[in-house]
Image (cartoon, grey):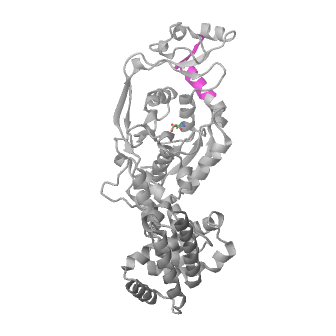
Amino acid sequence: MSRPRVRFAPSPTGHLHVGGARTALFNWLFARKEDGTFVLRIEDTDRERSSDEMTRSILSALEWLGMEPDEGPFHQADGLERHQRDARRLLEAGAAYRCFCDVSEGADQEAFRGGCPGGCRELDEEDSAARARAEPYALRLAVPRSGETAWEDAVQGRVSFDNESIEDFVVLRSDGTPLYNMAVVSDDVEMEITHVIRGDDHVSNTPKQCLIYEALDEEQPTFAHVPMILGPDGKRLSKRHGAASVEAFRERGILPSAMVNFLALLGWSPGDDREIMDREELIEAFSLDRILTKSAVFDTDKLEWINGQYIAGSSAEELAGIVAPRLVEEGGVGHEELDGDRPRLLRVLEAVKDRPRTVDALLQQTRPFFADRIEYTDEAVERFWADPGEAADHLQALRGCFEEIDEWEPDTLEQELRALADERGVGAGTVIHPLRVALMGVAVSPGIFRVLELMEKERTLTRIDQAVERLEEMAATA
Ligand code: GLU
């Protein structure tokens, strides 16, 4: 294949959503795999619904995902004069005609199947040009009255439409603005796009675009229409299904590498059962013929599972880069204190990173090691502090024994805790569970003796004091 050129062409009318990001990714992967060029075109001809803010948001989401364009962003609105010129070329080639009928947007377009009911298609050039001096007109494509328009779709196989079902559609409005399909083809020709990879919601536009290519005598690109993404209820994924923008997943603590891995598997498969694939592996394995023809279902659980794999697979250094700023901004941890305690932050991250499936959860496991105070989740309290008086009692006894320990390391701590539990005639778990809540605020954590070691002595004693205080309040109000 000579070097392909592909484009991602979002309309800046909203944030980049999952479907758009997946389209961008398939284009990007294809370009990387085939040593091609990935172009970004902002389709902003709908001035009222487009905004610079959304353009910036889309760009920042692409950057976050690591899919920056090789060329662009280009703005479709900047191509207006060329769009008009190309529409005129259609008129000159005899493939389009001036239509003087009701040119308002609301006019029934289906009435134009098979030609113009007002006879505009049959006007000879002289009459048409004469009327054009006095009357407003639109340019319509003269769609062949029989036969079919077909293309070989790289995903869907051969797709065809009877020409009878396609109306003589407008390419240029009477106010001189191009219609969507006109602008897209004009741009794709100008940008020398070789492959159009996009959502299958555009299949119905494609025969019109094919007719324009033909009329302009330009080479048609290869089309690849990717099936839609569905929510768990089988309906097209939308805001109704909760977070659907890339921004929202980013805020929820999904890592970009995990998002990319997950998006790639939405409607594409490597052909084996691999699920965790980094960027390089995805590029290596990507091809259009492995895009599935069946709609993909968006499964948040799977996204989080993949994210968990990426968190576990990241180095403590990498995770520190993500977690440290958030500990300061949201976790109430002092900047300087955290910097000074960097080696411990790295050890903590190493200890906790295997379990969390989101950065939020990772933060929840990290924060207790650095914050002055912690919250206790309802779940943890219900499970392990159900009897606050008893929990307080065990913790106080434990505090007394911990205070005496000079050698603050896991083996010693374990021996002491087990001895204390024996002395009190309870199993070790009866002491460990309330202790975990006291130290971490949650019901799960790495092994308690590792937690104690990383928490260090002074902080452990403070945490126990804080917990006892809370437990006593709870006991008093029970
Ligand atoms: N602007 C269109 C959209 O956001 C994409 C058009 C295309 O890819 O041809 O759906």
In which image quadrant can residue 461 be found?
A: bottom right
Q: How many labels does the image show?
A: 0
Q: Residue 124: tell me if it is visible.
A: yes
Toward which corner of the image does residue 78 lie, by quadrant?
A: top right
At 36% across and 79% down in the image, what residue appears? 427
Report the residue at 42% width, 42% height from top.
231
166 left or right of 363 in image: left
Q: Is residue 210 above or below residue 350?
A: above
Q: What stretch is highlighted in magenta?
A: 84-100
Where residue 295 appears, as percent x and y from the top left, is: 37, 41
Q: In this view, does 181 lie above or below 268?
A: above
Q: For the point 56% across and 51% down, which residue is it?
A: 247
Q: Where is residue 279 in the image (x, y as percent from the top left)?
A: 45, 60
Taking the image as shown, residue 277 lies to the left or right of residue 96, namely left
* x then y, percent, for residue 55: 63, 44
Q: Tell me if residue 314 can be seen.
A: no
Q: Which one is nearer the viewer's eye here, 381 or 167?
A: 381
Where is residue 368 drawn, in percent x and y? 56, 71
Residue at (42% x, 59% y) in the render: 306
Q: Is residue 94 magenta-colored? A: yes
- In magenta stretch: residue 93: yes
Above or below, comparing residue 407 to residue 37 in the picture: below
- Closer to the camera in the image, 398 or 105: 398
Drawn side of residue 230 relative to residue 328, left or right: left
Q: Is residue 329 above or below residue 110?
A: below
Compared across the picture, whether 394 is left or right of 39 comes to left
